Amino acid sequence: MPNQSIIQRDLAVLWHPCTQMKDHEALFPLIPIKRGEGVWLEDFAGNRYLDAISSWWVNLFGHANSRINAALRNQLEQLEHVILAGFTHEPILHLSERLVELTPPELTRCFYADNGSSCVEVALKMSFHFWQNTGQARKTKFITLQDSYHGETLGALAVGDVALYKKTYAPLLMQTFVAPSPASCYAEKGESPAEFARRQFAQLEQLLREHSSEVAAIIVEPLVQCAGGMRMYDPIYLKLLRAACDRYQVHFIADEIAVGMGRTGKMFACEHAEVTPDFLCLSKGLTGGYLPLSVVVTREPIYQAFYDDYTKLTAFLHSHSYTGNPLACRAALATLDIFAQDNILVHNQSLAQQMGQLMQRFHDHPHLGKIRQQGMIVALDMLKNPATDEPYPWQERRGLAVYRYALQRGVLLRPLGNVVYFMPPYIITPQQIELMVNVAYAAVDHATR
């Protein structure tokens, strides 16, 4: 069997991410993928899988998209890569101009990196360094939110709050202040998401009152805390946060690596609250899921704090070898073209509405609760007792049962523990949404028996 041969070769040499490799020996086999087309992935035996999670939240317009492919072919014939220190090129210039135009007002400068974690590292260092350059050297700490996730490199991990990823490396990490999550799953019965967000914000403001003189920035995932369990909160929290950051002279870092690029129903999640962060972090869907690229878009006064004679030693010297890769930039430009030409955000409204309607049947399931949606992201919790929010023990790995069952029926789901979610490509059809939801329901039913 071609699949089996590839699996054996893989297990002999590869170490996969976010994986206990022993699982692949007994619990579930690797799936070798030969090709992709639209929402589908196909293995070497001809089996097809609907990519309901956009290949870790990156793929926006389908696999092997003809328009992005054509843009990359054209760029490949001109320039594959060039150092960005002292050099520039057309794709990165065009992309930066368009991002400055598209992002919230007053964001004027683009600094590029390779991936989401690196992007967060840039924002953290830039904020810290800004305060050093402007004579406020005590501002060295960061505030993050309960359940937050910002990446796996040490700085990004330090400002996260998911113990599964962070606990082992705690001795290596800087200390942060953690504010309680505004996610409405924690609200009291009868308390609206907005009321709860305001109540939780009061505790964040208390942290600012006590520690603003030593805090450089607050970092949040606007509206949806993705890897922390797809926990969602009301936009009022972002409005309150922006105002508080201004009052206490603390930077606002918006990590939109997962929630940007149309996922929440607007191009950028901060637009739901009509606020502009001091640093906007973008990656994942920026290139349509084709190539690694990330960017921090920031304000002119922050840029100017680094702009001086070389001998003043104020320059931001962070760098990556593949910073601003022309191929990745060209893929990002093609992605932005599709958004503009196909009116994607309006189209997504009907897709999101259909997903929401089809999810209604999950409300009657005896082991499901906390069904929630923000744009093109839908999530629900498998619960032992929804009436009391009693969870299943994590050791039972019911999410793995959902994953295996769905794969057997041609749908790729990858639950976060006991949280089942959908984050499909924007080209998914109504028929494919129905298949995705029906298989998920059957998979959950199987896993909670």
Image: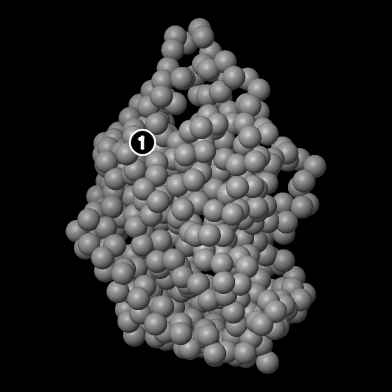
Q: Is residue 374 at least partly visible in the picture?
A: yes
Residue 343 x %, y %:
22, 62
User: Taking 449 as reference, is 332 left or right?
Assistant: left
Residue occupying image coordinates x 26% and y 65% = 346
Residue 78 x %, y %:
27, 42
Q: From this view, report whether residue 325 is shown above or below residue 449.
A: above
| Corner quadrant of residue 25 | bottom right
Residue 418 x %, y %:
65, 74
Residue 169 x %, y %:
76, 47
Residue occupying image coordinates x 29% and y 62% = 345
Q: Is residue 8 at least partly visible in the picture?
A: no
Instruction: Pick whichever, 304 or 324, lies toward us.
Output: 304
* Quadrant the C terminus occupies: bottom right
User: Taking 159 as reference, is 2 left or right?
Assistant: left
**Please, what secondary structure does the residue beneath circle 1 have?**
strand
Q: From this view, report whether residue 91 is shown above or below residue 390.
A: above
Q: From this view, report whether residue 355 is shown above or below residue 176.
A: below
| Corner quadrant of residue 447 | bottom right
Type of amino acid at the residue the image marks with label 1: Leu
Q: From this view, report whether residue 118 is shown above or below residue 418.
A: above
Residue occupying image coordinates x 45% and y 36% = 278
Residue wearing tag 1: 107
> Which color scheme is applied?
one colour
* Quadrant the N terminus occupies: bottom right
Residue, far left: 341
Residue occupying image coordinates x 63% and y 27% = 213
